[in-house]
Image (cartoon, grey):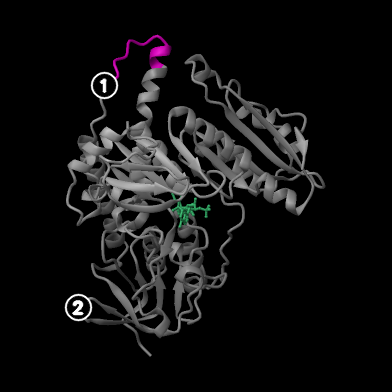
Amino acid sequence: MSFDYDLFVIGGGSGGVRAARVASATGAKVALAEEYRMGGTCVIRGCVPKKLMVFASSYEEQMHDAASYGWDVKIGKFEWSGFRKKMHTELDRLEGIYRKLLDGSDVMIYDSRAVLDDPHTVKLADGTKITAKHILVATGGHPVRPSLANADLGLVSNDIFLMEELPKDVLIVGGGYIACEFACILHGLGVNVSMYVRGAGLLRGFDEEACGLISEAMQSRGINIHTGTTIVEMAPAADIDIASDSKTTMGAPVDVARDLAENPKSDTDPEAAGPIWVKGSNGTEQVFQHVIFATGRAANTDGLGLEAAGVKLGRGGAIDVDEYSQTAVPSIFAIGDVTDRVQLTPVAIREAMAFVDTVFNGKPTKVDHDLIPSAVFTQPEMGTVGLTEEQASEQEEVEIYCTSFRPMQSAFAERPDRVLMKLVVSKANRTVLGCHIVADGAGEMIQLAAIAIKMGATKEDFDRTVAVHPTMSEELVTMKEPVRTA
Ligand code: NDP
């Protein structure tokens, strides 16, 4: 049977674009459909603009540090609209690069939504049907709001990059990657930030000691973290009789709340939805200019014709795939966030490469999801790879090597921040099972530690490596005694 293409990719994010380009380089005839902007979550509404905002938000602290180091510094005001314009210009430039890379790789681009019609056919928005020997679904995910009346008044991470003005205050709901990163970013840009975290602490699933330090650092900077707290009710502040209210308010004083309530914007789009009255499960009531839900993400599988084509969906509507990213339908594969394995850009790219090796290079390749390093871009950052102390101690007896100290640079600037360097080591064979770093630049450090750990380095391999002095990360090779066994 002959097909229009050897491969049709649905979705132009990091995974889809990489798979299309690399498959095309093998000589395959490839097309890709993207309904929105090329680059996907990472480039358009995720990692890239987020990291630019992380940089922007760190300068006030750096200027304070500079003053402590003798510089005559005048700290001016942050101007969101100028920064926002420049950030979007940069995103346009990157999108253009993605498009050029596809063009240069002879990948046919369809700027259209594409859905499955059958195991070898996709249908574009204008009804055109295109056949392909293989179809790769790489449609990513989207942020989800909790099921709560009026939840649509709240923003999600996508909206933050598009805000026309920075709010005076926000409530962020959630305690994961996105919640913590945006709490630090917005706080650093001058926004008064409160967080409702339903669990006992931030960043569930990460090393608890590391999370504790981040939580302390965030609170000492002035972020109001309320653990064990959720929203019970929310409504437009204009609908609530705040003036006659004698209830507790947590952050915005009642007169500010009243001002906000008296000047409501339209409630048709989330940007214009505030101010919002919120009742917390801790009994308090408060008005925030915006509520931001960072309560997880779900796979983009709705309306794609997947189930009709025979593709099986699993937890939260994500596509079920095997170790080769193949779905229940042999001609259809899926990679990236739409499969909800590990929602990280570099993982989607690895899955793309393994898919191309499997299908187009005759080298069946399983995706290696073991020991994936990652960073949380809070202030200070966390870099992590491997097992947490909690996970490792469930599986075997471990020794914990850990040190926490005030680093030279910020201590001189009289900042209270502490850093943490932690190794989780197998007692039986001395392998380093996990490494957790809380420090400025932890994301950069963990990338290098991850190479050694991926190679199976033991604690003794770390010990025989000469320290680079004076640095923070030298502690990773100079910790002599375990602080405890677990
Ligand atoms: P996460 O799963 O990390 O966090 C979701 C948070 O929302 C958790 O604290 C969760 O609580 C809480 N939550 C979920 N449902 C509710 C609810 N109904 N009410 C109140 N709280 C709720 O998701 P994110 O959206 O932060 O991030 C999604 C993924 O994106 C991450 O897993 C990560 O892979 C990726 N990412 C990576 C980044 C990086 O590499 N730096 C940056 C940003 C995102 P609980 O813990 O109790 O379930």
Q: Which residues are magenta?
A: 66-76
Query: On the image, numbered disc 1 is attached to which residue?
Result: 76
Residue under the image location 41 percent in, 61 percent down:
15
Residue at the location (33% across, 35% down)?
Answer: 252
- Most foreground residue, 36 or 129: 36
- Is residue 86 at all visible to an observer of this figure? no
- The residue that mark 2 highlights is 126
At 45% from the left and 62% from the top, the residue drawn is: 336
Work out whether 421 lies above or below 273: above
Check disc 1 and give the amino acid type.
Gly
Where residue 288 sits, quadrant-wise, is top left
SS of the residue under disc 2: loop
Residue 135 image offset from top left, x and y in percent: 40, 76
- Rendering coords of residue 152 (x, y %): 30, 58
442 to the left or right of 290? right
N-terminal label among 1 and 2: 1
Tell me which corner region of the image, top left, top right, bottom left or bottom right, holds residue 183.
top left
When the figure is inspected, residue 13 is found, relative to residue 417, above or below; the finding is below
Look at label 2 and name its amino acid: Asp
447 or 433: which is nearer to us? 433
